[in-house]
Image (cartoon, helix red, strand yellow):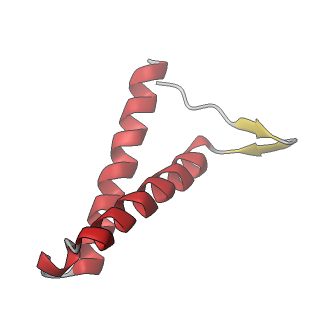
Amino acid sequence: MRFNEINLLGVYVAPISLLIIGAWLVLLVLRRLTDRFGLLRHVWHPSLFVFSVYMITLSTMVLCVAWWNG
């Protein structure tokens, strides 16, 4: 498993930072879907649930990138 820095317009960026932004964008879409259907009102602690979904999304993306590069 190798995570190399990514050259982004002359600035070397850690790959985890791009994965964090990508997971946040996926979370925005998922959050909009749950707001549209009103699913968060059935959750005990909505902000904790959203944070947990974000961590699951980020972990899944990191594992997929590690598997893809490995």
> Which residue is farthest top?
70
Q: Residue at x 35, y 46 (%)?
A: 59
Q: Residue at x 34, y 57 (%)?
A: 55
The answer to whether residue 21 is above or below residue 35 is above
**How many numbered marks appear?**
0
| Residue 34 location, quadrant | bottom left
The answer to whether residue 28 is above or below residue 6 is below
Judge by depth and name the residue closer to the eye, 32 or 1: 32
Q: Is residue 49 left or right of residue 12?
A: left
Q: Is residue 45 left or right of residue 19?
A: left
Percent across and percent down for residue 53 are: 29, 60
| Residue 31 location, quadrant | bottom left
Percent across and percent down for residue 8 are: 78, 41
Q: Residue at x 12, y 81 (%)?
A: 44
Q: Is residue 44 left or right of residue 21?
A: left
The answer to whether residue 17 is above or below residue 70 is below
Percent across and percent down for residue 33 are: 33, 63
Q: Quadrant of the C terminus?
A: top left
